Amino acid sequence: MIISEKLAEYMKFIIKTYPKGCASYNWLNYYADILNDKRFPEDYEFDNIIEECLNEFDSDIGLCGCGSPEETNEVLRTILNIQSSNCIWKERQKQFSDICNADMDNENYSGLIQFVLYILNDKDILEHGGSVGGSWLSEKGKVYLDLLNLQKEMNDKE
């Protein structure tokens, strides 16, 4: 699926998931033609649509936008990419250790990553069975990760 088709689907997902969000309100007024399948988003609209989608996710997980949201989104993107792999927890711990330059055998660092996983589970971005370390992406999490990856890809092209 090409980016414009994906974004049209993600816009519909955001409206369904966050019907009272700013993006839903704006899009129903300004992008009705996309939402009614009369056209796909144009290249010049991609950045804005991706940003508005991510703003809804950020708001949902409690990120207000102050500080360094780009850095926070990059950490979340990395964590979600690791969690989307089929690796066992020990391998994921090694990957977390590599990105954090931390010893994941240290209970503080391991606990910190697990805390983030608990929050992402609470916000329905991840789901888990018997262990939070084995969490997998929910449908919402897959959309969020794909949007984060699209944003990174587009930023890397600039």
Image (cartoon, rainbow, N blue to C red):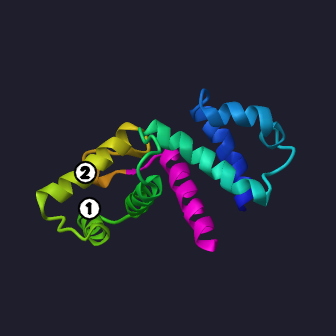
Q: Answer with the quarter of the image where residue 106 lies.
A: bottom left
Residue at x-position 77% and y-position 60%:
43
Residue at x-position 43% and y-position 54%:
68
Along the viewing direction, whichever of 100 and 132 lies nearer the viewer: 100
The residue pinned by badge 1 equals: 89
The kind of secondary structure the magenta stretch mainly shows is helix
Label at residue 114: 2
Q: Answer with the quarter of the image where residue 147 lies.
A: bottom right
Residue 154 lies within the magenta run:
yes
Quadrant of the image containing the N terminus: bottom right
Judged from the image, the secondary structure of the residue bearing numbered disc 2 is helix
Residue 63 location, x and y as percent?
A: 43, 42
User: Magenta segment, which residues?
Assistant: 136-158
Residue 31 lies within the magenta run:
no
Q: Is residue 137 above or below residue 13?
A: below
Residue 139 location, x and y as percent?
A: 52, 45
Residue 153 location, x and y as percent?
A: 59, 67
Q: Is residue 21 above or below residue 118?
A: above
Please give the count of numbered marks on the rendered protein: 2
Is residue 128 at all visible to an observer of this figure?
yes
* Residue sitting farthest toward the right: 38
**Which is nearer the N-term, disc 1 or disc 2?**
1
State if disc 2 and disc 1 touch (CB < 8 Å): no
Q: Amino acid at mark 1?
A: Trp
Q: Answer with the quarter of the image where residue 124 lies.
A: top left
Is 97 on the left or on the right of 70, as rendered?
Answer: left
Residue 9 location, x and y as percent?
A: 69, 47
